[in-house]
Image (cartoon, rainbow, N blue to C red):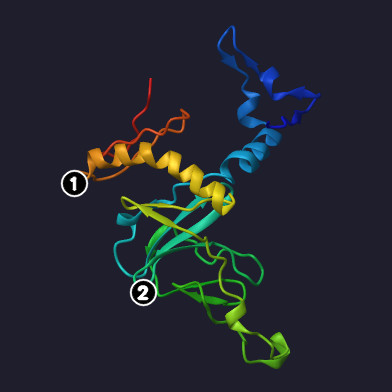
Amino acid sequence: MVAFIRAPGDRSIRSYIDAERGTISRETYVNPDIFDQEMEQIFQRCWLLLGHESQIPNPGDFVVTRMGTEEVIMVRDRKDKQIRAFLNSCRHRGEKVCRYDQGNSLVFTCPFHAWTYDTKGKLVGAGFQNSPEAYTDTLNKAEWGLVEVAQLCNFYGLIWPPGIAKPRHSRIIWAHSRRAYDTACSRVMGRMRGWGCSHRSSVIVYRPTGRFPASPR
């Protein structure tokens, strides 16, 4: 059973919901404690949609997206053309290595000290990397690549990472979710132009064309 946190004033989350009147307190949307609990108990434990492969059709194409509170670079590698995803955070000082929403790039370079990563996430260069005064001549680039999002799943072109769920639990979650996605995706194959989804419902609603999401009433 989920252990509900206590909000300021020792109020439980349930106290923000009035089932008889059909209302939910505005504080459920702005309370930082509730947000943290949702991140930990929901979004870090389930499969999250990063994007669609059509967003990065060419080698070197990238798009910046999110996994919960983490900013992620989804990129198509220039050599093997595989889709990979990395945390948008330099391994040196944690600064963003990509400041654009989308584009095409040979490498990603941190503006602080020029740590530079290729589209496989490998560290390929750094400012003063050969100077004994900078890194005491001990910078092993093989150990300092970008943090990669593991176990990406490409399902009808949709790119999913599994969150932090354990491998067995991750497979179970995906097995249950896949049935619904398989039905939805198979109906629109061949006429897909773009995807929209509604964040106002626990049921994700996709539509095959158009820029704006379909909204359940």
Compared to residue 133, the image places residue 86 above or below, namely: above
Nearest to N terminus: mark 2 or mark 1: 2
Per the rendering, the mark at residue 78 is 2
Residue 100 percent location from the top left of the image = 45, 60
Would you identify the image quadrant in which residue 175 lies? top left
Which quarter of the figure is the C terminus placed in?
top left
Compared to residue 210, the image places residue 11 above or below, namely: above
How many circles with numbers are drawn on the protein?
A: 2
Is residue 24 rendered to the left or right of residue 203? right
Residues at marks 2 and 1, CA–CA distance in whole angstroms: 27 Å
Query: Which residue is identified by label 1?
Result: 190
Residue 213 percent location from the top left of the image = 35, 34
Residue 148 percent location from the top left of the image = 53, 65
Residue 135 visible in the picture: yes
Which quarter of the figure is the N terminus placed in?
top right
Per the rendering, the mark at residue 209 is none
Q: Of the residues tagged 2 and 1, which is closer to the observer?
A: 1
Compared to residue 184, the image places residue 151 above or below, namely: below
Residue extending furthest right? 9
The residue drawn where x is 68% and y is 32% is: 2
Is residue 73 rendered to the left or right of residue 141? left
Is residue 178 rendered to the left or right of residue 47? left
